Amino acid sequence: MWTTGTVIERIEWNDKLFSLRIEADVEPFIAGQFIKLSQIRDEKRIARAYSLVNPPGKPYIEVLAVAVEDGQLSPDLQALKVGEQIEVSTKAAGFMTLEEIPTGAIQGPHLWFLATGTAVGPFISMMETDEPWQRFEKVVLVYGVRLIEDLAYLPQIKALQQKYPQQFIFIPSVTREHYPEGLSCRIPDGLQSGLIEQTAGIALSADNSQVLICGNPEMIGDAQSTLTEKGLVKNLRRAPGQITVEKYW
């Protein structure tokens, strides 16, 4: 099902990276889920999935997107002005939510978010709710990008650092230029070498951690392999584990 949404605000992070706030009549969702935006072109619907950045309960939905030069939808999204309209799916989807994370002894005290690029969106949504801070002693966000200008939502992330100074650990990693406030490695490489754990100041193991991974497929595959070598296993409803993954492409 589709509904018509109206853009009420735009946030420009750089010349390609942007956020849209959209008023739309969508069903209640769970932090971490995604919706679809679409347009009809040549009598064919072009639809793409975008994670919801805002927490549940806001009077709008918010998505983070990057304009791909030959993309079928993203250039049109980037061109949208405040007051213009876009089709929005009425129901969110996706299982990368804290509801899917095991509770009890298997949960462990540490929650790790591993994100590249726009995939930081669902983790922002989760961190803007009370649940991660109530369930876990430490919450670690590892956020990998190519350039410093690609680090979206830094003000919001720093506000979370101030709000939860004893719980929240933020580790940005910029691979193509020097960033004095972070690392300069691919996330899987930082996991393999132990640099990410060293920077966080806490260990990442099957006994104490739940890990949510979202981003480009190569990062997801390599990070999951490294974590598997550490003894972590994929979290399934029929067999609870420590690794939860969301793939959009």
Image (cartoon, rainbow, N blue to C red):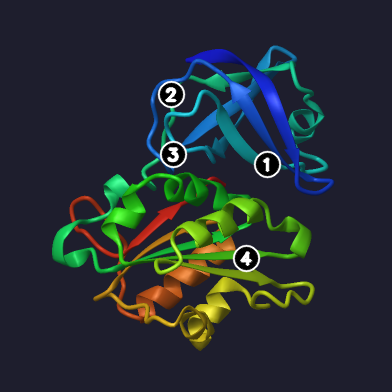
| Front one among 12 and 155 | 155
Real-space CA distance between mark 2 and mark 3, rounded to the nearest whole angstrom: 10 Å
Decide if residue 147 is on the left or right side of residue 142. Answer: right
**Which of the 4 image quarters holds residue 207?**
bottom left
42 versus 157 height, above or below: above
Q: Which residue is mark 2?
A: 91
| Proximity of marks 2 and 4: CB atoms separated by less than 8 Å | no
Q: Which residue is mark 1?
A: 65
Question: Which is more N-terminal, label 4 or label 3?
Answer: 3
Real-space CA distance between mark 1 and mark 3, rounded to the nearest whole angstrom: 15 Å
| Proximity of marks 1 and 3: CB atoms separated by less than 8 Å | no
22 versus 206 height, above or below: above
Q: Secondary structure at mark 3?
A: loop
Q: Which residue is mark 4?
A: 144
Residue flagged by tag 2: what amino acid is it? Lys
Question: Which is more N-terminal, label 3 or label 2?
Answer: 3
Counting from the top left corner in percent of width and height, residue 130 is at 35, 47
| Proximity of marks 1 and 4: CB atoms separated by less than 8 Å | no
Question: Which is more N-terminal, label 4 or label 2?
Answer: 2
Residue flagged by tag 1: what amino acid is it? Ala
